[in-house]
């Protein structure tokens, strides 16, 4: 038999850990699900603490430069996601930090409007072919936001709600009493500390807390789906876009030749035209780092390799474009994402597991927490334009004192790819934070929360739910 290599280990000495906070609800992770959780829990009257490992809130929506809130409506233009998602967009729009189609354009087939988004290379987010109209392309309600304004606005919303906020604080392990989570340990420049809580919400994206708590989970990822891909995102600015587009349209063969050349060198040819106001000359590069096998977002060595490679390829892109492509003569890299783009990973096994069958039914669950547009499945979407997500997808089957409010909600990989994006995660967080506050108030475990009370509270918050 082959010898198994020995792994050298060190026993960490036991030590007393300072308890720096005691709260009703502790939210770990300040991404879309985390901010939704903290705001909703605090507004519902729970003493709440939000901890976030970076120096900003928003996660992929800000630090990952994935500043797109897609699929807020179905293909007909009917809006389904409201609540905190709409509030965030409205607050940013008031500051000039959000852009979206006019309401009268949601669902339009107007060729001029459709082509505007296609020319910006944002068709994947704004345009769908409607089988009910013979495959005609229609515009969705999707918003893009300024990531720097978003960071500031989320700070305001969390603090205005009354939640405590600890940035630069990495939640590492749950504090356990048997199978019940009682709080979390976190690391920071202040050393290891603990926060005790009656309900902990795992909004880490990768299930860092529920895995350490012993919850069952699914880590299957297919490399054929975006959930297995990582991305190094950067923005290029000072581009003369009109000059570039004139070259692209007047010399298509030369443009194609340069596209092939930059790709061969390891650079990136695909971009999204920044369509935020006051950002003329900005292009967004969402550069996927696709591996031969599914990427492991939990392997620090792989993350390091991909970050180094992504940065190198971004500079190859910049140097090539500046030297060879009209319109890019004075360009420079405006910013690179402080967070490597991760799109999938571990998913909790919850009391309900969302599967492909759920996309082909119109079932309204008694514990529905959000109605989402089902836009990406062709004929299936034409027959079933929405999907109802049950609260049970946020509740681990065995571990108590814990909810999951992020892309790690209970689902198969094939379904997760459609409903783990930013707006659904904010909605999951809003539901989890509300449920956590209800559980604390009633003195029950999160799995015992009254579904009707949860439904009624979410409706009061402006969430679009079926009449129950």
Image (tube, rainbow, N blue to C red):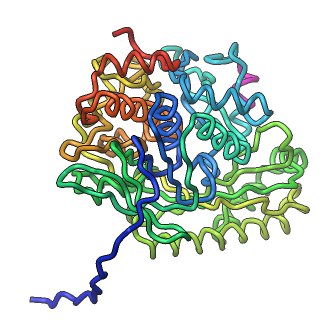
Q: Judge whether residue 297 can be spotted in this image.
A: no
The residue depicted at 52 percent of the width and 18 percent of the height is 462
Q: Is residue 114 within the magenta segment? A: yes
The residue depicted at 41 percent of the width and 49 percent of the height is 22
Q: Which residue lies furthest to the left in this view?
A: 1
The answer to whether 328 is drawn above or below residue 467 in the figure is: below
The N terminus: image quadrant: bottom left
Q: Where is residue 212 in the image (x, y as percent from the top left)?
A: 29, 60
Q: In the picture, residue 69 is in which quadrant?
A: top right
Q: Is residue 436 within the magenta segment? A: no
| Total marks in image | 0
Q: Position of residue 164 (x, y in %)?
A: 54, 46
Q: Which of 178 and 280 is in front in this view?
A: 178
The residue range painted magenta reads 110-116
Question: What secondary structure characterizes most of the magenta part?
Answer: helix
The residue depicted at 28 percent of the width and 22 percent of the height is 450
Q: Nearer the viewer, residue 350 or 201?
A: 201
Q: Judge whether residue 339 can be spotted in this image.
A: yes
- 458 sits to left or right of 119: left
Q: Nearer the viewer, residue 154 or 250?
A: 154
Q: Position of residue 135 (x, y in %)?
A: 53, 22
The C terminus: image quadrant: top left
Q: In the picture, residue 359 is in which quadrant?
A: top left
The residue depicted at 39 percent of the width and 62 percent of the height is 185
Q: Position of residue 461 (x, y in %)?
A: 51, 20
- 372 sits to left or right of 173: right
């Amino acid at each position: 038999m082959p010898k198994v290599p020995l792994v050298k280990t060190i026993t960490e000495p036991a030590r007393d850990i300072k308890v720096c906070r005691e709260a009703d609800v502790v939210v770990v992770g300040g991404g879309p699900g985390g901010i939704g959780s903290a705001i909703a829990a605090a507004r519902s009257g729970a003493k709440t603490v939000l901890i976030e490992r970076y120096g900003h809130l928003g996660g992929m929506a800000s630090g990952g430069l994935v500043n797109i809130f897609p699929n807020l409506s179905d293909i007909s233009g009917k809006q389904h996601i409201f609540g905190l998602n709409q509030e965030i967009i409205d607050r940013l729009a008031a500051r000039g930090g959000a852009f979206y189609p006019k309401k009268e354009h949601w669902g339009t087939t107007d060729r001029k409007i459709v082509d505007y988004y296609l020319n910006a290379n944002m068709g994947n987010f704004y345009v769908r072919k409607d089988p009910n109209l013979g495959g005609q392309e229609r515009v969705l309600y999707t918003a893009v936001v300024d990531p720097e304004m978003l960071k500031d606005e989320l700070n305001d919303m969390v603090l205005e709600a009354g939640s405590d906020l600890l940035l630069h604080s990495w939640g590492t392990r749950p504090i356990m009493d048997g199978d019940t989570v009682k709080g979390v340990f976190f690391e920071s420049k202040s050393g290891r500390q603990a926060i005790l809580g009656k309900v902990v919400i795992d909004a880490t994206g990768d299930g860092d807390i529920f895995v350490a708590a012993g919850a069952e989970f699914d880590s299957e990822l297919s490399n054929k789906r975006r959930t297995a891909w990582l991305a190094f995102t950067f923005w290029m600015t000072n581009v003369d876009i009109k000059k570039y587009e004139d070259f692209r349209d007047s010399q298509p063969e030369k443009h194609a030749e340069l596209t092939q050349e930059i790709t061969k060198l390891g650079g990136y040819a695909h971009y999204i035209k920044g369509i935020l106001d006051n950002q003329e000359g900005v292009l967004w590069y969402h550069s996927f780092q696709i591996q031969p096998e599914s990427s492991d977002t939990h392997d620090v060595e792989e993350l390091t390799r991909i970050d180094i490679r992504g940065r190198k390829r971004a500079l190859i892109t910049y140097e090539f474009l500046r030297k060879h492509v009209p319109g890019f003569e004075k360009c420079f890299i405006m910013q690179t994402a402080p967070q490597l783009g991760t799109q999938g990973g571990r998913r909790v096994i919850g009391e309900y597991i969302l599967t492909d069958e759920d996309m082909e039914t119109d079932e309204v669950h008694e514990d529905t927490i959000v109605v989402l547009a089902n836009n990406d499945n062709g004929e299936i979407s034409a027959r079933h334009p929405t999907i109802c997500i049950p609260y049970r997808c946020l509740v681990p089957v065995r571990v108590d004192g814990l909810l999951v409010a992020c892309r790690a909600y209970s689902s198969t990989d094939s379904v997760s790819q459609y409903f783990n994006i930013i707006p659904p995660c904010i909605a999951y967080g809003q539901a989890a934070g509300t449920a956590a506050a209800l559980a604390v108030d009633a003195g029950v475990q999160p799995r015992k929360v009254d579904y009707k009370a949860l439904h009624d509270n979410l409706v009061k918050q402006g969430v679009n739910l079926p009449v129950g």
